[in-house]
Amino acid sequence: MPQTLTEKILSRASGKEVSPGDVIEAKTDIVAFHDLTGYHVIEVMEKAGIEKVFDKSKIVIAFDHLAPPPDIRSAEIQVMIRKFVKKMGLPNFHDINFGIMHEVLLEKYALPGQVIVAADSHTTTSGAVGAFAQGMGASDIAAATITGKTWLVVPTPFKVELKGSPRKWITGKDVALKLLQEFKADYFNGMSIEVYVENPSAFPMDYRATVSNMGIEMNADALMFIPDEETKNYIKTMRGYEPALVTPDPGAKYTDEYTIELGKLEPLVAAPYSVDNVKTVNEVEGKEVDQVFIGSCTNGRLSDIEIAAKILKDKKVKTRCIAIPASYEMFKRAMDLGYIETLVNAGCIVTYGTCGPCLGGHFGVAGPGETIVSTSNRNFRGRMGSNDSKVYLANPAVAAASALEGKITDPRSIA
Amino acid sequence: MIIEGKVMKFGDKIDTDVIIPARYLKYTDPQYLAQHAMEPLDPEFYKKASSGVVIVAGKVFGMGSSREQAAIALKAAGVRAIIAESFARIFYRNAINNGLPVITLKDATKLIDEGEIVRINVETGEIEVNGRKYQGKGISGMALEILKSGGIMEYLKSGKF
């Protein structure tokens, strides 16, 4: 039987031919955690009295949620994890100066066809290179860390096709929000989304990462881009080697298909308090904004920072504006290209490699009554701070234009 | 496994940020977490739930983050089981790993009212409310074994995984 990417990866990982609905034990190629979940993973292992890892080279740890630590408890959590890393002799550890875990996985580790599990829901991000990547809780990740395997239900594959090329100021975020607008947050529960890009270079890896990242907001089990030339180029550029591509068989069967004409997309915004409360930017423009956040594992990549810099070049922001490239690598490249200077000159506060504001952790928590435009992934009540704050999710062009005008703004109207 | 409790009802898309906000995730102590369960929706939740309740909710209950504290907080606050129209995948696993039974029932929020007493057979998925009977989807197979073992780590220690 011709296999979808989902079936192909999970058949290889479980050692038998799988079908949707099967409960399987799958071998994991990478197991990862960050600071805020990592201490919990280690606690679970200690409590069970089993402190071992299945393969040192396959464990990836990156500090991001509590980076740099905003309080003593956060610092204590990081101390504890560093001790674990040292004790176990784990080589793939990335301290607070490196990057957000999902970005680190993408830049350095994830490969087409892998099974990746990590203690964070946005693990779906690694689907951008065609890995079957799922977030799980601390106990499941503790078990995977020890055994190198996990159990899962084989999801039902659904195909999305992206045709044509996006217009100016349209990015991966608008594709993610379009899927949420059309299907809402519950439709893809129990499914894996496989995205086929008609013209690989028209939808680069940064955009793919945003869509895969928000697969979890669609409640999809995984959201994978079918590996193509862009996948190969990205990995070669970032790591210096060419990966083997794993692709679905011709004629593989999907439960359904959906096509997005990229050239017809408009900038979209998810209004409070739900990721699927999606509107066009024109439906919400003019709303006053207190703070803009450009960053996170969703939109903290070079092209996101580049878009913000293009819009803010030689101008001043009217809101508080926080920009956080997702990793040192992204920050460094943005700095070399002059984007960081542009943002700082425009009045933005810039750092890198922290999740901080996205989850209402630190470095820009929302106050009561405040309105935030954010390029991150969730706008649930209280997500970015106060229960009485409101978060609008948008692409970096909408976010930067809104910072410039002090209200939600359609970037097409100013640049 | 039979569970009984008074119903507390919630709507669709109850997310992990309202089940337990991120600012409480630096600790795993169940009693600490219980006090903040559902805080953004109802700061008194833990008092109301303390007598032992069953949550009845709509679609994709527990959507959002992987925080295992979501399941720990609800259980410690007094939630004996959750009946929902559907569950988010990660929350479902976290609930099983923390001994919190999760039952899927189509149209649950239409069929069951706030304050009613429900009786659930966790394995068969049979639900009884004031003499009315509904067939939900219980917990079976490997998930049931993990629940009965007391979580994935105990299951692993028993040599089955």
Image (tube, rainbow, N blue to C red):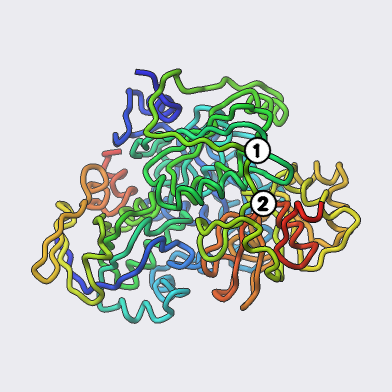
Which chain letter goes with mark 2? A
The number of callouts visible is 2
Nearer to the camera, A223 or B157: A223
Above or below, A251 relative to A309: above
Query: Badges 2 and 1: C-beta atoms under 8 Å apart?
Result: no
Q: What distance separates the C-alpha of mark 2 from that of mark 1?
A: 16 Å
- A143 relative position to B136: left or right: right
Residue furthest right as drawn: A314
- The x and y percentages for residue B88 are 39, 53
- The x and y percentages for residue A86 are 59, 46
Q: Quadrant of residue A220?
A: top left
Above or below, A253 relative to A149: above
Which chain letter goes with mark 1? A
Return the residue at label 1: A263
Nearer to the camera, A90 or B40: B40
Q: Looking at the rendering, in which quadrant would you find the N terminus of chain A?
A: top left
Nearer to the camera, B124 or A162: A162
Instruction: Tell me, for residue A395, which label it has, or none.
Output: 2
| Residue at (35, 24) in percent of width and height | A15
- B120 relative position to A364: left or right: left
Which of the two discs, 2 and 1, labels the residue nearer the N terminus? 1
| Residue at (34, 53) in percent of width and height | B92
Q: Is residue A79 visible?
A: no
Q: Secondary structure at mark 2?
A: loop
Same chain check for tags 2 and 1: yes
Q: Quadrant of residue A21?
A: top left
Q: Secondary structure at mark 1?
A: helix
Q: Amino acid at mark 2?
A: Asn
Q: Amino acid at mark 1?
A: Gly
Q: Is residue A273 visible?
A: yes
